[in-house]
Image (cartoon, rainbow, N blue to C red):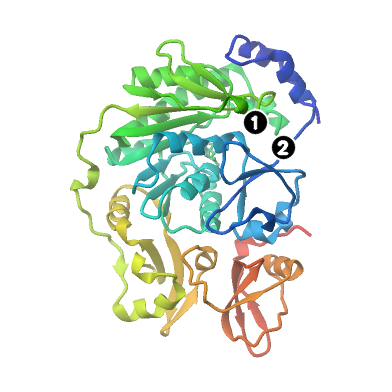
Amino acid sequence: MPTQLPLLFLESLEGLAGFDRIAFENVHQSGEQLTSIRFNPDKVKQVSFMEASVEEAVPWASQGYYLSRRPSFTLDPIFHAGAYYVQEASSMFLEEVLKQTTDLSLPIKILDLCAAPGGKSTLIQSLISNKSLLVSNEVIKARVNILAENITKWGAANVIVTNNDPKDFQRLQNYFDVIVVDAPCSGSGLFRKDATAIDEWSLQNVTLCSQRQQRILADVLPALKEGGTLIYSTCSYAESEDEAVADWLMNEGGLLSTKININPEWNIVETQSLQHHAFGYRFYPDKVKGEGFFIAAFTKGEKGKPDWQTTKYKTKSERLIAKEIDIIKPYLKDANDFFFIKQKEEVLALPIHLENDLATFQFSLYIKKAGVKLGSIIRNELIPHHELALSTVINPALPFVEVDRETALQYLRRQEIKIDTTLKGWVLLTHLQLPLGWVKVLPNRINNYYPKDWRIFNK
Ligand code: SAM
């Protein structure tokens, strides 16, 4: 469908670096739609593995690919297994910005402040080391569930999902090495993908968004370490939401701008803000194979202030006793990498080096999800949780049954399934070798344990 752009909107973009009105209007009128996905490197080792047709690589993303057509992701079992995330290509450029600003081989703490539904968070998780921590936060309660679901599907244990207002992070002064603020914005960069967003666009809304962006940044900046990196992005073209906010960060936040090296073939437009010449990177759909996007990186002063870690907290949670740890050990690839806590009756596994962070957050934030939920121990047996099935910490030697696509879809619809197996008890169901979830094999039937809330309804 061609997208008709409002005159007032087009006029507001005149004079912006890289804006070519005719090409911009043409690309919106062409009706062309792009679909891109990003593989989960902890689950997918080769691209040919994907059923949908992969066309070409996204030039700035190591795991990003364009698809030649948009398949029904709902009807692709490995989508539900967390094999890939459907993400707009321009926003995958965060990878390049992170790589050029941060030593990702070090154990770092990184906050993704505006994280739902989880596109940037899953990307960040794939780039950081196992010893690093990602706090994936979303302020809007109704959007935290989808974030937690996508993080669960991605499968990593070094992520904590929180549901906090940006100002709550002031309790964690000088804590994070990197903060990513993918701010709520007026959304003009997505007009080609979603023409209904045009109805909500107005100059007043752009102004409101710009003010809100500054408030969010002011609230969260104290949580960034001295010498740490702030990455700011929007999907708006508006100068007042992009370069003007970069100027504000340098004025009010005392930050320094960081230049990112870009390959000229990528056609990304480097801009500089009016006042402080802060570098920013603009993506126009008539120039790149992606939607409208803006991203900029900054450093906070010099290194020097002591880290937060001077305060040691003890987790409030109940710990597992040795006998209970023995019960869960066989379910994990390497149980020695984790510490275990109990929440109500459920056991959680978190990387050992995150113990102090978890305790700190228990005192300061609302935690929606932490690490991987392994299940409940009942009568000396683990009743395994769905999170464990989808996690990358699961022991690959656990009993499993590989099923075809039709059976996988029946399972995902939470229907009755039939499988031919001699196994008994808790068994993982896999499709293309990727775990989809648990079934319990009983003498005369198979119980389907796919989570009710996640089941698919699509025929
Ligand atoms: N980073 C996400 C991704 O890549 O999937 C997309 C984030 S979206 C552009 C902006 C997010 O900011 C939304 O999830 C929205 O709910 C959240 N948000 C809205 N108002 C906010 C506020 N006042 N403070 C912080 N976040 C807010």
Residue in front for this viewpoint, 413 or 66: 66
Residue 424 % position (x, y): 59, 86
Residue at 73% across, 57% down: 75
- Mark 2 near ligand 1 (CB under 8 Å)? no
Residue at 40% across, 13% down: 276
Discs 2, 1 touching: Cβ within 8 Å: yes
SS at mark 2 in the image: loop
- Sequence order check: which comes first, mark 2 or mark 1? 2
Residue at 75% across, 24% down: 27
Q: Is residue 51 above or below residue 382?
A: above
Instruction: Find residue 24 and report its image quarter.
Output: top right
Residue in front for this viewpoint, 78 or 201: 78
Query: How far apart are labels 2 and 1 at the CA level?
Result: 9 Å
Instruction: Find residue 92 and report its image quarter.
Output: top right
Instruction: Find residue 320 and report its image quarter.
Output: bottom left
Residue 211 % position (x, y): 46, 22
- Amino acid type at mark 1: Glu
Binning the other alpha carbons within 10 Å of mark 1 as few (below 14), some (14 to 19) or many (20 upward) gives: many
Q: The N terminus appears in which quarter of the rendering?
A: top right
Q: Which residue is mark 2?
A: 34
Any part of residue 342 in sight: yes
Binning the other alpha carbons within 10 Å of mark 2 as few (below 14), some (14 to 19) or many (20 upward) gives: some
Q: The C terminus appears in which quarter of the rendering?
A: bottom right
Q: Is residue 94 above or below residue 443?
A: above
- Mark 1 near ligand 1 (CB under 8 Å)? no
On residue 291, the disc is: 1
On residue 209, the disc is: none
Q: Is residue 320 above or below residue 3?
A: below
- Amino acid type at mark 2: Leu
Residue 55 % position (x, y): 73, 44
Q: Is residue 141 left or right of residue 354?
A: right
Any part of residue 253 in sight: no
